[in-house]
Image (cartoon, coloured by chain):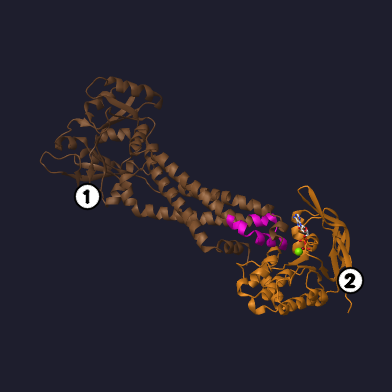
Chain colours: A orange, B brown
Amino acid sequence: MSDFSFQLRKVSKRFVKGKETITIFDNLDLDIPAQDYVAIMGPSGSGKTTLLNVLGGIDQVTSGEVLFNGQRVDTLNEGQLSRWRAANVGFIFQFYNLMPVLTAAQNVELPLLLTKLGSKDRRRHVATALDLVGLGDRSKHYPREMSGGQQQRVAIARAIVSDPKVLLCDEPTGDLDRTTADEVLEILALLNREHSKTVIVVTHDPEAANHAKRTLHLNKGIFVERTKLA
Amino acid sequence: MNHALLVTKNIGRRKLRTVLLLIAIFIAFLLFGALESFLQGFNAGQNSAAADRLVTVNKINFTVPLPISYVDRIRDLPGITHATSQSFFGGFYQDPKNFLLMFATDPQAYLQVYPKIVLPPEQRTAWLNDRRGIAVGRIVANKNHWKIGDHIPISSSIFSRADGSHSWDFNLDAIINLPEDSQRESVVLMHHKYFDETVTFARDTTSMIVFTTASPKLNDSIEKQVDAMFANSPYETSTDTAAAFNKAFVAQVGNIALIVTLVVSTAFAAILLIVGNTMVMAIRERTREIGVLKTLGFSGPVISAQILAESMLLALFGAALGLGTAWLALAATRRYLEALIPGVHMTGAILAAGLGWAIVLGLVTGAVPAWSGLRLRIVSALGRR
Ligand SMILES: Nc1ncnc2c1ncn2[C@@H]1O[C@H](COP(=O)(O)OP(=O)(O)O)[C@@H](O)[C@H]1O
Ligand SMILES: [Mg+2]
């Protein structure tokens, strides 16, 4: 067992657009210890989402190695990656990305359909996750019947229901007003503190960065680290 | 919640669209079920015609009679085993709409030409010895609620009696049971002698002569021989196998098989395009959601299976509705249909073929979206803002 959640070794990511090759990052190294809470900031287009996608195994690196718990994940095939993601990573997006045809509880239950849990156990896990985000009473509501903040909390419940080690959040408060954004940030902090989740948040929101243990600034393909002052 | 619920939730997300699709599929399979059932009714008549049975009619067409003496002349030819006259009577019971497939014939000879008809001995004796006796196919007997021993008045739309009336009295002496041959189960057979002594015209004639040969191999030469024998006479003949005669009879109504095939395949091509196109659009609308599912760990094959299940469920449900309605409609109108097309009904084979086509429809219309679901890359599905 490694003390590291993620390790990037000399990771490069390039896109070929016609004759041009765009380099997003080149020979990037990064260590994220287990139970870390990192905020990743940087100008738009600097590659934050791409980095998160690489960590979550939904985008490939051009070269270099990506390790999770000391194991290579950049070499896994698509099926292996699916299983790896289902077991280890929870995703939280800016626009929640809930299924409109499913209730809150059904949305949260989705990842559990890929496990061996029976329906009773699944319901119990769903109830626990919804309680944790403070939406125990909204399980039968559809996304369209909920506010943005509530939808984002359902999305967090969906991300944690199968108890992954890591939460990858791409601008999770980008679409929320200050108060609801703070509620969401509180939940992420709680998950890091009380439930030992490694949390990696891509954000433009300085407040979001304030909740993190440290902040990485991504600019022109390199990191500038600023550890929290307070 | 489970995968099946997810599939049905997706089907139900656009109610109007789903209903319209189901109606399209429903209509196609209603057509398929009904038309195939008609077609099999026609074919049943053709298939039941034994290969070694031939039919001679007037060369002009089968409504112009032949002299009855031709029966004996044909029977006497070498290679011919049995021959019988068979005259259209144009019979109906009570109401001209209740049309009967009725022939005047020589009962003894008829039973030789159709050896598969086995009558109970007492019924056979009764019919052969009763000049006013009729033998009646099971389907007709059931339809009209006739029993052995009934006295049945039957009128003719072609002939009238010498005494001016249009109605003949018959005794029901025998019932023909031959489930494999719905045409035989739909006939009413009267004595040619009774016919001959009561009608005002067409005495000593027959509308067709049916005969059997020693072997189907002889058929070609015998056909030529018979027609050659009567060539240049006032009554030239046209001889064919019973199967070909039935086909020709059907051809007069129109090339039904071709029409059925055209109608059904057009309907299929149309719904294939409609359903296929709609499925592609429906899945494209859900690109982002599919990307999210994949992010959560749903693999490409699982996504494809869900999409295929969706198109399959639509196709099977629509087809079941269409075939079921066709079956009900045929069952409800069977009494009337059987007078026109004996043996019209939806067989298990038609049902199975219908469900087979539904599976094909489901697979084909689901194939393209399932393939794109399988290949969909998460990063492009989630999109870039
Ligand atoms: N599939 C792609 N093809 C070409 N360029 C891409 C692709 N994906 C991302 N990019 C480019 O990579 C850069 C980084 O994108 P992204 O990771 O979304 O940045 P951020 O999240 O920091 O705003 C952008 O300039 C974007 O245009
Ligand atoms: Mg981004």
* Subunit ID for the residue under disc 2: A
Q: Which residues are magenta?
A: B281-304
**Distance (Cα) linking label 1 and label 2:** 101 Å
- The percent coordinates of residue A195 (x first, y second) are 80, 75
Residue ranking furthest to the left: B163
Please identify the dominant SS of the magenta region: helix
Above or below, B97 against A46 in this view is above
Say which of B86 and A142 sits in front.
A142
Quadrant of the picture in which ligand 2 is shown: bottom right
For the residue labelled by badge 2, is the local secondary structure a helix, a strand or a loop? Answer: strand
Quadrant assignment, res A84: bottom right
Q: Residue at x 65, y 72 (%)?
A: A105
Identity, as a three-letter code, of the amino acid under mark 1: Asp
Identity, as a three-letter code, of the amino acid under mark 2: Arg
Quadrant assignment, res A191: bottom right
- The percent coordinates of residue A163 (x first, y second) are 76, 70
Magenta span includes B291: yes
Image quarter in which the N terminus of chain B is found: bottom right
Residue wearing tag 2? A226
Give the side of residue B307 with respect to residue A71, left or right. left
Residue wearing tag 1? B95
Above or below, B235 against A89 in this view is above
Is there CB contact under 8 Å for labels 1 and 2? no
- The percent coordinates of residue A92 (x first, y second) are 73, 68
- The percent coordinates of residue B277 (x first, y second) are 56, 52
